[in-house]
Amino acid sequence: MIKHLRIPLFSPGKKKEAEPETAPAPPLPPGAEDPGDGEEPGEALRRAPGTREEPGAPFPAGPEVGREVRGNGDPDAAALPHPPGKPARLLSMEDVLSRRPKTGDPAAPSRFARLPILAKFLPRPAGPTTGPHPGDDSSIPASLQPRRLPFAARIPILAQLLSLLSPEEEPELTSSAFFVGDTGEPSLDGSLKDVDITYVVDPPYQYIHIEYDREARALSYGVVEPQLSEDEAHYLGVIKKAFEKMIGTNVDLVSAEHRVAYLREHFDSIITILGFRFTDEQRERIYFHLKREYIGYGRIDALMKDRYIEDISCNGANMDLYVQHRIYGPVRTNVRFDDLELNNFVLKLAQISGRHISLLQPIRDITLPDGSRGNLTLGGEVTRKGSTFTIRKFRSNPISPVEMMDYGTVDAQQLAYLWILMEYKRSLLVSGGTASGKTTFLNALCGFIPTEYKIVSIEDTTELNLMHPNWLQSVTRMGFGTGDAGGAPSGVGGGGRKAPGDISLYDLLIAALRQRPEFIIVGEVRGDEAFTLFQAIAVGHAAMGTIHAGSMDELLSRVESSPMNLPRNLLANLDAVIFPMQIRKGERNVRRITNIVEILELDREKGDLVTNTVFKWLPATDEFKFMGRSYLFDKIRDTFGISLEDLRQEMADRADLLLWLQDRQIRDYKVALGFIRAYYKDKDEIMAQVRDGTEITADDIAALVARAAVGNGDEPEAQSV
C-alpha cells in the first residue's frame, strides 16, 4: 500500500506554514457540479476535492481552506471532515481505487482517470456539440484550444499506450439458451420403449431427462443443466481464483449449515470488487456452477440429488457413468470424466469422507457426509481403465412401508404380520442377495418398533436411518497405522487383521449387550460377531439384521461355515427369516419378498430345523399368499395370554390401516410413521377414521410429522437447568 507522508517545508518555529500537498480524491459523478464553482463537469472528474482552478493558472492551486468538501453523490466524499483553517485529509491510493463510479454509466471514467497523475494524460470527455454548455469548448478562444488538450495528445506514442490502459466499455456477455420443457414424474406404467420424461431434481437449474434411444435400443439418462458460454466460463475462472485467494489468506471455520450463505456472500463481494457487470440471470448461472463445484459433487451433483437413484458407477476415465434407477433399472448417463479430472475427483471424495487413498493404498471404502457408502480405486494399476468409484446412495427420508407396497415389494397383510412380531419382540433376519433390498426393508420394518423400546444398532458403514427417539447408533472404526501384522496394506477393510485402535462389530456387540436394549440391530452379519449375536438371542434379547443368502439352504451353509461357525442349535433361537429377491419381470427388474419363513425348533434326532412358510410369492400372478397358519402366533398366545382370534383381528386391522394410507397416497416416511405411532396410542380413534373413510387434512399431516420427529434431533433443544 502506498503511504502518503506530510513533510513540512518550514521549521515549526517559523510563523509561515507550508501549503499541504494536493490530495487525490474520488471523482464526482459525470455531469455533477461542485457547489460554488462554475467549472465544467469534465473538470470535476480530474480535480481533487478542495482545490480550485485559478484564472490562467496551468495547474490546480493549493487546497482551499475553510470550506467543507462535498462530493456530489459520493457518500464517502461527503463524510470527509474539513474544518476551517485546516488542510484537506490526504487519501491513500487504495482509497482512490476503491471508490468506483456507478457501474453501467458509459460516461464513467476509467480506473486510471481516478488518479490525478494519470488523469492529466488521458483524453477529456467531449462537450456537447450544440448550444452553450459548461462543457462546450466554443467559449474558449482558438488560441487557447491546444492548451486544453492533454499532454498525451501531443505525443502519439504515449496516446496509443494510454488508450490501451483505458479500454472502451466492455462488450455485452453472451449466454447459452436453457430450456427444459414439460416435466413429470417417473412411472412403473407402460413400456420402456415409450419412456420420454423430464423430472425436477433441484429447480431452477437441475433436471433429469430419460428417454428410449432407438439406435442404442436402451434408455438414456441425461442431466439437464445450464451450460456456460465462453465469456461466462472465463469470468467463472476469474471468480474461482479470487475466491481461493480470499479463503487462502483468511481461513474461516464454517459449519455445514452456513456454507451456502458463506459462499454466496463472498461471491457477491468478489463481483462487486472486480466490477463485473452481469445480468441477474448470468449472475445466478455462474453462482450455480460455483456452488455445484465447491459445495456439491461437481459433475455428479444432480445424480446425488436425484431421489430415484440408488447406485452410481464410474468404471474408468472417458467412459459414461451408469446409475441404478429405482423405476427404470440400470441406465447409461451422459456424464463422464477425463483421466486427470477423475483422479482429482476420487481424491476429493476420499478427503471429504475423512479417509486417505494413495498409490500405496489404492482401494478405499468411504462414507460420504450425507451417509452414502462408496468404494474408490485410484490409478490404473488395480483397475486397468483408470480410477473408479461406486456410490450407494443414502436416503435422508427413507422408503416407507406404504411406498414399498406401491412398488409391489410387499403387501399390507405381510407388513401387518411383521408389525405384530415387532411389537412382541421377535428376532428376525433379512436374508437375500446383493441389491435385493435387504437394508431398505429392514429400515422400513424398524418403523413398527414402539417408541419406548430402546434400539442399539451396529454397522460397518452408516446405512440405517431410524427416526426413533430411543436409538443408540454405533459404527465401527478403522485403526491407526498397520500394527505389527501390517493390517490391510491395500486399504481394503475386512482383511482379517486388526490394526491398533480398530473397533470391530464384535467389540460393538459386546458393548451393546451392556447397554440394556430391547432390540439389537446388526447392519450385516458376516463374521465372528454372529456367534455372540445368536447367544444374545438365546438369553432373551430381540435382534434383527441382514445376511447374504438367497434361500434357507444357502443360509445354513453360510452360518455354519467359516468365519461364522455357528452351531445349528443356536440358529434355532431365531424366530423368522425374510427373503427379499430382485427378479426380472418383463422389461424391468423388480423386488419381491418371496418367502417369510418361521423357525420353530431343532429336530434333535435328525439335526434339521423345523420351519413353517407363512407367506409365499406366486410368480405367475405376482401375488402374495398367506399359507393359513402362524406358529409364532401360538408362541405369542402361550407367552402373553392373547387369543389367536385377537391376533388375527389385530393383523386384519393393521392391514386395513396400511391400505387406507396407500389409498390416500401417504407415502412419506415421517407421515406414515406418525400414523403408526398414533395407532399405538389411540387405536380406536385411528380405526374409526379408517372405517369412516375420513379424509386427511394438511393440518393432520403436519401434526403427525411433528409427532414423528420428536426425539430425532428435529425438535428444539432442551434448555439447560
Image: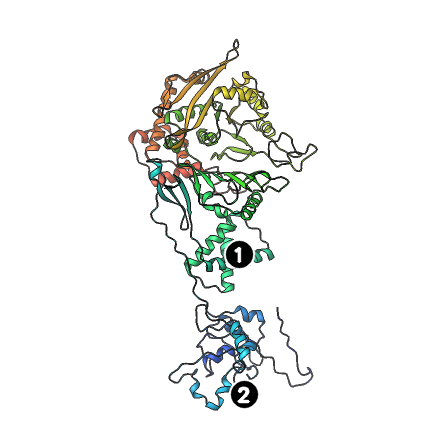
- Residue 46 appears in the figure: yes
Q: How crowded is mark 1: few (under 14 residues within 10 Å), some or many (20 or more)?
A: some
| Secondary element type, mark 1 | helix
Q: Which label was assigned to residue 240? A: 1
343 is higher (above) or lower (below) than 446: below
Residue 67 image point, x, y percent: 52, 80
Q: Mark 2 points at which residue?
A: 57
Q: What residue type is labelled 1?
A: Lys
Residue found at x 42% / y 87%: 138
In the displayed structure image, the side of residue 596 where residue 493 appears, left or right: right
The part of the image, by quadrant, that contains residue 397 is top left
In the displayed structure image, the side of residue 70 where residue 630 appears, left or right: left
Closer-to-camera residue (303/34): 303
Q: Which residue lies furthest to the front in this view?
A: 215
Residue found at x 65% / y 37%: 480
If the image is split into quadrants, where does the C terminus sit? top right
Closer-to-camera residue (116/428): 116
**Residues tagged 1 and 2 counted as in contact (Cβ below 8 A):** no
In the rendered structure, which disc, 1 or 2, sits on the residue that comes first in sequence? 2
Residue 512 image point, x, y percent: 57, 28
* Tally of numbered tags: 2
Q: Which label was assigned to residue 375? A: none
